[in-house]
Image: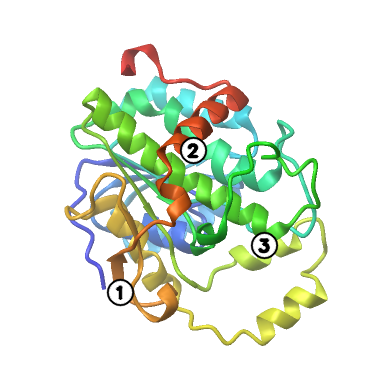
Amino acid sequence: MYVVPAQDGKLAVITGANSGTGKEAARRLAEAGAHVVLAVRTVAKGEAARAEILDRHPGAQVEVRRIDLADLASVTAFADRLLADGAPLDLLVNNAGVMAPPRRMTTADGFELQLGSNFLGPFALTVRLLPLLLAADAPRVATMSSGTANYGRIRFDDLQWENRRYSPNLSYAQSKLADLLMTRHLAVVAAERGWNLVSTAAHPGYTRTNLQTAGATLGRDKPSPLHALVSALDFLPSQEVGRGTEPLLHAATSPDAVAGGYYGPGGRFGLVGPTTAVRPPRRALDTATAARLWTDAGRLTGVALPVSAR
């Protein structure tokens, strides 16, 4: 079991913190002394998660704030509220995401849902919060990717899946490869500008959460018969949420985590087991692609590095 180092006096923001790896990360960070902001789309679910954490740790410092990463106006409002508070931000955990909705859907801003929710929203949030991150002593940004990034491809000619047949799985893989490229490019930018900011990434292997089912039911009353059959026949090794959250916690808090580092399970097929450093897929190491994607994300979201952070 990974032991989170003392987080007393630190402020942490975790997206998607009402369930799964997000809630587990929030609980363990709060237990270690951090003031944790549960950044969630549905406030009632966030409050339920907060109540669970407080029930186990009555002295925990946990609050709930609303954000919808599929709506840039919501991202802006969330960031503006934190900026108005003015407290340095020690840790941003980009955990929230949506997985493989069965048909092409779009965000409030017209982006393909998985690209928008899993990459463009977190990108916009990260850049908007840079002034607060850079005001902290040793800030970190930890972003959740996925093993599916291994077969992801960034299709600059059709990032939004408008001109080809939509694939739920390949769209998800593209968005998670984009997260890795963002992580690594942020680490490069930080080094170039002399920022004391560590940007890391993680993947949970095959961790049993509601992510797979939640994505599969988007636009439906229940998962498709094929999805239900595949789930029932699943023979791959899997792990519970506590173990599956540890790569993310390692990326977010370990003194051994390095800028641009990528962490995941070290057991069977990279799906289960104790956390280890894992090699990013080859496409995630392409610095030209990372820089181009960062530029495109800035154009699509209208977000750029603040003048004070240059």
> Foreground residue, 101 or 38?
101
| Front disc: 3 or 1 | 1
* Mark number displayed over residue 274: 1
Residue receiving disc 3 = 214
Q: Nearer the viewer, mark 3 or mark 2?
A: 2
- Kindly identify the residue that appears in the image at 42 percent across and 20 percent down: 305
Is 55 drawn above or below residue 235 in the view shown? above
Q: Comparing marks 2 and 1, which lies closer to the viewer?
A: 2
Q: Which residue is drawn at 31% across and 37% down?
A: 187
**Disc 2 residue type (three-letter):** Thr
Give x and y (percent) for residue 140: 29, 41
Q: Residue at x 26, y 23 (%)?
A: 193
Side of 256 where 238 appears, left or right: right
Residue 154 pos. (x, y %): 59, 45
Residue 234 placed where, x, y %? 62, 84
- Give the amino acid type for the residue marked by disc 3 in the picture: Ala
Where 15 sits versus 58, above or below? above
Q: Which mark is residue 289?
A: 2
Which residue shows up at 21% across the image and 32% down it?
196
**Front one among 181 and 132:** 181
Residue 208 relative to residue 234: left or right:
left
